[in-house]
Image (tube, helix red, strand yellow):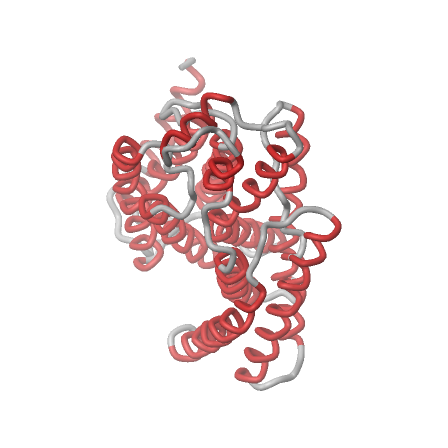
Amino acid sequence: MNTGVRAHVAEFRDQYWERGEPGRDTPARLTKPLYQLWLAGLLLKLLGSTWDVAWHFKWLRDEFAPPHLLNTAGTVIVVALTIFHTFTGYAVDRTALRLMQWGTGVFLIALPIDLINHRINGLDITSWSGSHALLYLGTAIMLAGAIRGWRAYYPAGRAHTWGLAALWMFFLENTWFPNQHQEYGVISLGAWDAGKPEAEPILLQFAADQIGRPVDRTAVLSFALPIPDWVYPLWGLVSTGVVLVLARRTIGKRWAATAVAAGYVAYRCLVWPVLMGVDFPTSAVPLFLVLVGICVDLAHTASLPAFSAALLGSAAITGIGYGGIWVQQQWLEAPPVLYPSAAVTFVLLAAAWTGVDLWARRRAPALS
């Protein structure tokens, strides 16, 4: 560390490293870099996790693989920020701080559990394992804290709006993340059927050995698409619908949900050729999510009672979501789905949307 950097660190320490309670006045010159660091840390976690999925469809798992190290770098930034907020009380209220603390804590507890799970169960490539669910949960809670803190403390203006949209995009990505198993899996199975498997022989052999089979299509199917066909649309559309409704409420702009969904889809489209260029597996990109965002925004724009908006919005998301998956299956690539599950998806999404409305009216009037 050179003299100039040491001087800046010492100046920052002397000026801001002091014990304080959450909710204290925070100057904009401190709030901005703090939350910009949140964006940087979350971006590193996003890039690492994206690479990690592709890595798991090509190579055997390795705790020190480059994607894990990239994700760890982002986690270190987030943990350091949580410690700073906790000690100083700057740029957070009590609720935001608790969410950051609980989210970071759950994530850090989930890490050794996941390592133990892999030691016991081997590959465990599916994104739907219990230890992975804890990682998603911890990330979701810490993101909720960052979103609350950003809304309350980041200076008003265009940067406030776009930064909040970026945080919601990270939240959407974290929620959608387990569905990527099916999106990579359908491409992986297609590559096997075409006689050009993307996974290395050592990974295929390991996956086959786990279920006591030779390396054949049945083994590849078990490795690539082990999840029931109803999970992809049901989890994806219900969780995405709820996230985008909350994003629309908190951002408060007319096309906010569309922007968040389009941002995530654009990110997936951008990393697709990058992964292909470095010879890693690619995935089916959920292009239909942009239409889901449009449905959410239109439901909020129309002058409808809350319950009617929830019903009509849920019906539109269900119809367009399942229809969009079908179109992608015909013209591009999309995971297999169980179409009769649309009825359950509609009911669950309508109930969840209505629940968000009730919570917004009773606990957070500003979101209504």
Image quadrant where residue 41 sits:
top left
Q: Is residue 297 left or right of residue 116?
A: right
Provide residue 281's location: percent of width, then percent of height: 59, 31
Note whether 121 is above or below 129 in the view shown.
Answer: above
Q: Is residue 67 left or right of residue 327?
A: left
Provide residue 150's location: percent of width, then percent of height: 47, 53
19 or 267, nearer to the observer: 267
Q: Is residue 326 left or right of residue 338?
A: right
Image quadrant where residue 337 sits:
bottom right
Q: Is residue 76 left or right of residue 28?
A: left
Number of labelled discs? 0
Provide residue 98's location: percent of width, then percent of height: 29, 54
Q: Residue at x 62, y 24 (%)?
A: 279
Note whether 321 is above or below 210 in the view shown.
Answer: below
Residue 175 visible here? yes
Looking at the image, the residue that sits furthest to the right is 331
Residue 76 visible here? no
288 or 120, nearer to the observer: 120
Provide residue 61's location: percent of width, then percent of height: 40, 27
173 or 130, nearer to the observer: 130
Q: Residue at x 44, y 29 (%)?
A: 214
- What quarter of the picture does the N terminus occupy? top left
